[in-house]
Amino acid sequence: MSRRVLVLSAGLFAALAGVPCAAADADAGVDPPMRVQARANPAQVRLGEPFIVELAITHLPDQRYELAPTQAELGDFEFLGVERQRVDGPDSSTTTLQVKLAGFALGKHRTPTLTVQIDQAGRSHDMELVGTEVDVLSALPQDAEQKGADLADVRPPEAVWVRTWRLLWVLGVLALAALAAWGTARYLNRPKPAPVVAQVPLEPLHLRTTRALDELAKLNLPAQGRMKEFHFRLSEIIRGYLGELYRFDALECTTPELLQQLHARHTPGLPLEELAVLTEESDFVRYAKQETTELDCKKALELGYRVVHHTYAALPGSSTPPPAGASA
């Protein structure tokens, strides 16, 4: 255990059990106390048990007595605290200091010499007060040695299991970290919404078909001797137009199937007989390798324009004339 200490200075009193104290140093300019009484309460204590050294000091009313704040070695005693009380009378005052100590050596001992500080008229002086007798007894019963309950030697440190929630806290933090990682992965791997692509409305059928015919004319395939390719492209353009206009799969139809589908529908403005001749001649050129001329290709292209022009003009509400290429 630690030992709290009091620094002691100034004059020494001969005894504290009702004996008047010696006069203070004349140079200090402070009057000595009228009477000092000291007693241990209780006078017999057990080892390590707190007890009180009570100092009753009778002094002049203009004086103030306190235990000195500085500390010195207390030997086998430990300082535990102090309480101060004061009672004022007409001619004198009594200050009672209750110093709390604990003893750690068996037998009769004198308590440590204590220093009190006197303040009077702006002057200060320290006085030493000799301790009083106290009997420190063993904490064990008298028959402890016979019963084998004597004091044992100091045991070495031992491991003591202390209940702790640290493991649960660690597991909780790990669980939260795993949950956060799982949530982050789910968020990063979430299905991405498909980008919204602005739908550009298709141009009217007759404009798209007329543009396709214009592009075919610019290629000038017959002048390059590519008659078969010309007829393939022209047939695809016309079939695609008729299939979308009359709502059937014209691209997959043979020539007889195509004509049969057209005959079965209402096709105002469609030059059906000329179209039948064109499709049959185109089949001969594409599959039978029949010879054809640039003039025949030009007439076939003009028929394609007429098919678009006449069928568009026959549609209800088609007041807008077709593009200029349709009259070619």
Image (tube, helix red, strand yellow):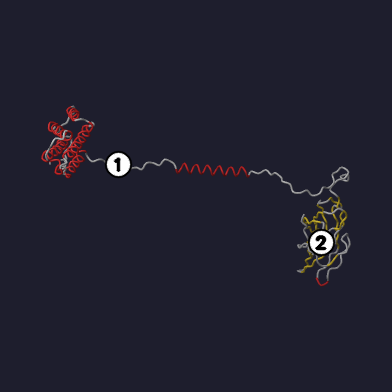
225 versus 53 height, above or below: above
Question: Is any part of residue 91 visible from this angle?
Answer: no
Residue at the bottom extreme of this rendering: 27
Front-lying residue, 11 or 75: 75
Image-based side of 238 in relation to 110, left or right? left
Q: Measured from the top left, where is residue 277 in percent x and y?
A: 13, 32
User: Where does the C terminus fall, quadrant-wise?
Assistant: top left
At label 2, counting other C-alpha atoms closer than 10 Å, the crowd grade (few under 14, some 14-19, many 20 or more) is many
Real-space Cα separation, disc 1 to disc 2, in angstroms: 102 Å
Q: Measured from the top left, where is residue 249 in percent x and y?
A: 23, 31
User: Where does the N terminus fall, quadrant-wise?
Assistant: bottom right
Image-based side of 278 in relation to 32, left or right? left
User: Which of the two marks, 1 or 2, is nearer to us in this view?
Assistant: 1
Front-lying residue, 318 or 114: 318
At label 1, counting other C-alpha atoms closer than 10 Å, the crowd grade (few under 14, some 14-19, many 20 or more) is few
124 versus 291 height, above or below: below
Residue at the left extreme of this rendering: 295
| Amino acid on which the number 1 mark rests in the picture | Gln
Residue at the disc numbered 2: 114
Image-based side of 33 in relation to 159, left or right? right
136 versus 176 height, above or below: below
Question: Is any part of residue 131 visible from this angle?
Answer: yes
Q: Measured from the top left, where is residue 164 in percent x and y?
A: 65, 44
Q: Measured from the top left, where is residue 194 in percent x and y?
A: 37, 41
Front-lying residue, 168 or 297: 297
Front-lying residue, 274 or 73: 274
The residue drawn where x is 76% and y is 49% is: 156
Q: Element type at marker 1?
A: loop
Mark number, residue 199: 1
| Amino acid on which the number 2 mark rests in the picture | Leu
Q: Number of labelled discs?
A: 2
Q: Element type at marker 2?
A: strand
